[in-house]
Image (cartoon, helix red, strand yellow):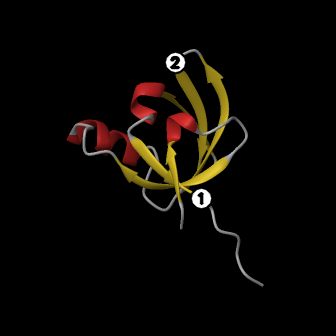
Amino acid sequence: MADAGSLATLPVGQTRRIEALGAELSDDLCRGLMDHGLLPGTAVRVLHRFGDALVLTVRGTRLMVHAGIAAQVRIEDVQPLSP
């Protein structure tokens, strides 16, 4: 799959898959993000932007993440299923 950048750059209404959580994030922060469903391979969609925060939907749950943290979450394009 093609590298699509970071979650912070994803436009509102777009869906991508999480590729990886950045090595710059602390272990506790990574654990917290993963506890909220931000796991590699999981689809994530940006619903809204509020200043320095993004409102996401992950596995049917809404989650607000600071843009600085979202910049450390690598995303990749979602590949359509072949018929």
**What residue would you read off at disc 1?**
77
Nearer to me, 73 or 61: 73
* Residue shown at 53% from the left, 67% from the top: 1
Residue 79: horizontal and vertical position, in percent? Answer: 64, 68
- Name the kind of residue labelled 2 in the image: Asp
Q: Which residue appears at 21% of the width and 42% of the height?
A: 27
Tell which residue pokes out farthest to the bottom in this image. 83
Mark 2 — residue?
52
Q: CA distance from mark 2 to mark 1?
A: 23 Å
Q: Position of residue 16 (x, y in %)?
A: 60, 53
Q: Judge depth for marks 2 and 1 and give the one in front.
A: 1
Q: Is residue 30 left or right of residue 11?
A: left
Q: Residue furthest left?
A: 27
- Give the side of residue 34 with respect to residue 27, left or right: right
Circles 2 and 1 in contact, beta carbons < 8 Å = no
Q: Secondary structure at mark 2?
A: loop
Between 58 and 53, the one lying in front of the other is: 53
Q: Residue furthest right?
A: 83
For the C terminus, the quadrant is bottom right
Q: Secondary structure at mark 1?
A: loop
| Residue 10 spot, x, y in % from top left | 60, 39
The answer to whether residue 17 is above or below residue 10 is below
